[in-house]
Image (cartoon, rainbow, N blue to C red):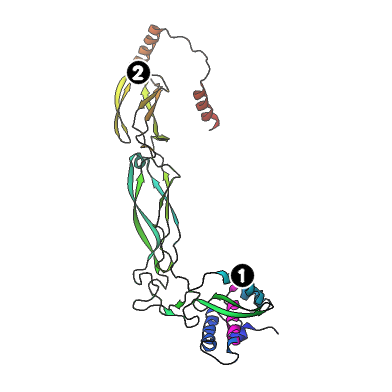
Amino acid sequence: MAVDHYEVLGVSRDASDEDIRRAYRKLARKLHPDVNQEDGAEDQFKLVTHAYEVLSDPEQRSRYDRGGDSFGGFGPFGDIFETFFGQGAQQRGPRSRKERGQDALIRVEVDLSEVLFGTTKTIELETAVLCEACEGSCCAPGTEPQVCDICRGTGQIQRTVRSMLGNMITQSPCGSCRGFGSVIANPCPTCVGQGRVRATRAIEVEVPGGIETGQRIHLPGSGEVGHGGGQSGDLYLEFTVTQHPIFQRVGDDLVATVDVDMSDAILGTTVTLEAIDGPVDVEIRPGVQNDDVLTFKSRGVTKLRGAGRGDLALHVHITTPTKLGQKENDLIRALRELRKPDAPALRGLGPKKFQRLRDRFFGA
């Protein structure tokens, strides 16, 4: 005859999880073999414990309510297999309330100017921190966990199962204390018995020079505090280097364009320009050509791996005036007459110029 688990625990079919837990604790105190030596008490204790195991598990309870067998879908042979392959093979004794906290990934934006030499940033993150009220004990100040009166602090419940192989002892976590071996009668009101609270924490991070978008820094033990004041997880910082309005980064080099007027390109000039790390004296030699590159050694980004810095490369772009006054036009005509330049002619594009032209009109 099938056993009605609800009837065994003395609760209705719509009983809440707390009602089922309360009923089990009451019956377990009364029927535990260490307390009740009457005939049949041990068998009743096994029925009560098994009923609780089924009804306290949402999946097993749902299957049972749908008409599953009275053993929650497994029967006594399930306990035999657990003994050899499942819970019976687990380490005995109560488990710790302390759990390792989860790792966290934070994305951090840095300016190109900040990664030129590296910088120190203060980052604020919302995470779990140790509860200062209970210092991770989960108990209200002045109280402590109480030894579970069902499992007597072992965190485990043993049952004897009769099978074709004889009597076998199975062991499973205590349903009353959930395997901790103790219960918290007075949870800390600040953290609600979690041993940790949510808070905003500020950390200082050394951002190394030369770091690139997508690279990460690993900070062991800087993640969230675990349940019960357990070990903190790790923190990973993933960096995004924001674009600069003038300078672009190519590896460890900085690249920009310098506009040079036609007259300065012909006659040459010297100008002081402001780079990211300060002023740079730029000498435009007479006759400089469009797309010439002026290179300044060690004015780029600090190398992340290795010593030194990259270079600063300025691409020359010669600007041609589009509106000239009468006097300017006369001077240009006079210059043309003096130089008698060759007429415009066709010639092939070099690979680099062809690539730039293709990218401009047809996309990269």
Residue under label 1: 84
| Quadrant occupied by the N terminus | bottom right
Residue 223 spot, x, y in % from top left: 41, 58
At mark 1, the secondary structure is helix
Residue 293 lies, in percent from the top left, at 40, 24
Decide if residue 174 is in sight here: no
- Distance between the alpha carbons at the discs numbered 2 and 1: 91 Å
| Residue lying at 44% horizontally and 43% vertically, measured from the top left | 213
Identified by mark 1, the residue type is Phe
* Residue for point 40% across, 79% down: 186
Q: Assign a secondary structure to mark 2.
A: helix
Residue 133, horizontal then vertical, whole percent: 34, 71
- Residue nearest the viewer, comparing 55 with 45: 45
Graded by Cα atoms within 10 Å as few (under 14), some (14 to 19) or many (20 or more), the crowding at tag 1 reads few
Q: Identify the main secondary structure in magenta.
A: helix
Q: How crowded is mark 2: few (under 14 residues within 10 Å), some or many (20 or more)?
A: some
Q: Which of marks 2 and 1 is nearer the N terminus?
A: 1
Amino acid residing under circle 2:
Ser
Left or right: 231 with respect to 48? left
Res. 293 visible in picture: yes
Residue denoted by label 2 = 263
Quadrant of residue 145 within the rendered picture:
bottom left
Residue positioned 35% across, 59% down in the render: 201
* Image height of 123 relative to 158, above or below: above
Q: Which of 268 and 164 is in front in this view?
A: 164
Whether residue 8 appears in magenta in the rendering, the answer is no
Does 58 lie within the magenta span? Answer: yes
In front of the other: 334 or 343:
343
* Percent x, y of residue 199: 37, 63
Q: In which quarter of the image is residue 254?
A: top left
